[in-house]
Amino acid sequence: MTATTAPTETSEQTEPQPGPETRAERVRRRLIPAVAAVLSGVLLYLSFAPRELWWLAPFAFALLGFVLHGRRARSGFRLGLLMGLGYFVPLLSWTGVDVGPLPWLALAVAEALFIGLAGLGIAALSRLPVWPVWASGMWLLLEAARSRFPFEGFPWGKVAFGQPTGLFLPLAALGGTPLLGFAVVLSGFGLADVVRRLRAAPRARDRAVLTAAALTVAPVAAGAAALPLVSTAAEHGTATVAVIQGNVPRMGLDFNAQRRAVLDHHVRETLRLAAKVKAGKAEQPDLVLWPENSSDIDPFVNADAYAEIDKAAKAIGAPVSVGAVVGAKDGKPRNRQILWDPKTGPGASYDKRHLQPFGEYMPYRSFFRIFSSDVDRAGVFQPGTKPVVFDMAGTEVGPVTCYEAAFDDVVRDQVNKGAQILSVPSNNATFERSQMTYQQLAIDRVRAVEHGRAVMVPVTSGVSAVIRPDGTVAQRTGMFTAESLVAEVPKRSSLTPATRLGVWPEVFLAGLGVAGIGWVIARRRAGTGS
């Protein structure tokens, strides 16, 4: 009789299969990346003026890169859009001053859509070798797109404009704002890749980790290497420049309802400076810069406005660049800078070329009127067509009017035209005490380094400033005060590599994003992509 034995359990137990995902787990899986994406946008916003927390920007992109890595395209778009909202909603809050939240939020959403598209592309590129390089190119590609489309683009908020100081800034002199922005993004994405790889294998020291670490550090090292390109040397002597801030009667959109008062304020402040010069309390300026809209009364039509400006120019004894609204032969207004000589009166002029949509002109007015009657407050200005440099007592001054400073081509054109110093006459009274004026000042500081020029910033209500060619602020005013700044600034004519290279760094860097997408498509067709 044979004995039977009970079956014994094998030493290897079957792995327990995970149960179905609970609702709480599903919410957590979706919520955490969404919160992280919004947080990355907020971090990027916090890196911008009026704060000088430039070092936050790479961490913002590190968080974004970590969240987007390996995602599907739809998820990448959604997370990118959330990042864009976390960034642009607070950054552009100044656009809602006096017109309410609808235009502000509409603009923020429109700009965030570009970040959503960038997120889609970055997610797809994150499976490639050295993905931070291709992903940074994708960011630059979408940044270039939104700087040109729609309505001639809206470059405000480019990553480079959050870097008016810090380790990356010298790269502006090498490759302009595109290279500066690319370096910041690449450093952040490189850091994300380092963290991701070490998290997966804490003890790993393989080539991929070292490559990611190199991509994190290389932009910082490149910034240090580019530092010799930044110079404040006076190549053609110096010029003593006066910046006039006359102030406005009141803040808001209706400030120029008292247009004569605005003109009177700037005349009065110029006469006050002239009295100080005569008393030996201030240095005699070689040239004087008034802000945009310092005379919204056309001096060619109104004899009293002409007489007041002429009186101020004669009193100070120097040529004055006057910001005025003038009517052209076609009957449409121009936002114009007029070179006013104390002896011969008005001469050369420069018409603002990049006009502010929904402010200085209204695209599709009848359509947008459906949403807000405020569209009828927008102007009907016509843009200028060419760069103009003023010869002001032997100093070549390139005017770049307010909003134009955000456009690479306008500033570069003025330098290539021969500007030895740059002037950014502005009118920020519409935006009251918002952060707009500080964001614009940061843009001007980056431009100073990009082109190796001192930048003068005369503003109707502040903050007016004198910026050295290295981006540092030599003098500045307060807001909504009547003040004048007098400073000796270097005259420079040498061209930085960024100025010489023009648009090509942007073409190359954005091309990396296009090349990366081409590689992804090729891999998928070959069946090697995931």
Image (tube, rainbow, N blue to C red):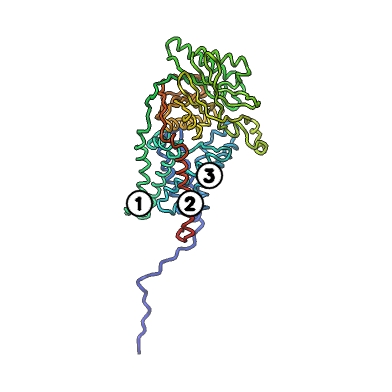
Labels 3 and 1: the sequence-earlier one: 3
Amino acid type assigned to the residue bearing label 2 in the image = Ile
Residue 54: image x %, image y %? 41, 37
Tell me the element at label 1. helix
Q: Residue furthest top?
A: 279
* Closer mark to the observer between disc 2 and disc 1: 2
Residue 265: image x %, image y %? 55, 17
Labels 3 and 2: the sequence-earlier one: 3
Relative to 85, does residue 356 appear above or below in the rendering?
above
Identify the mark at residue 517; answer none if there is no mark: 2
Amino acid type assigned to the residue bearing label 3 in the image = Phe
* Closer mark to the observer between disc 3 and disc 2: 2
Q: Residue furthest bottom?
A: 1
Residue 477: image x %, image y %? 46, 23
In-front residue for pair 414/436: 414
Labels 2 and 1: the sequence-earlier one: 1
Q: Which residue is mark 1?
A: 209
Q: CA distance from mark 3 to mark 1?
A: 30 Å
Dot 3 and dot 2 residues touching (CB under 8 Å): no
Tell me the element at label 3. helix
In-front residue for pair 141/17: 141
Identify the mark at residue 114; answer none if there is no mark: 3
Residue 347: image x %, image y %? 55, 19
Rate crowding at label 1 as few (under 14), some (14 to 19) or many (20 or more) other CA atoms within 10 Å. Answer: some
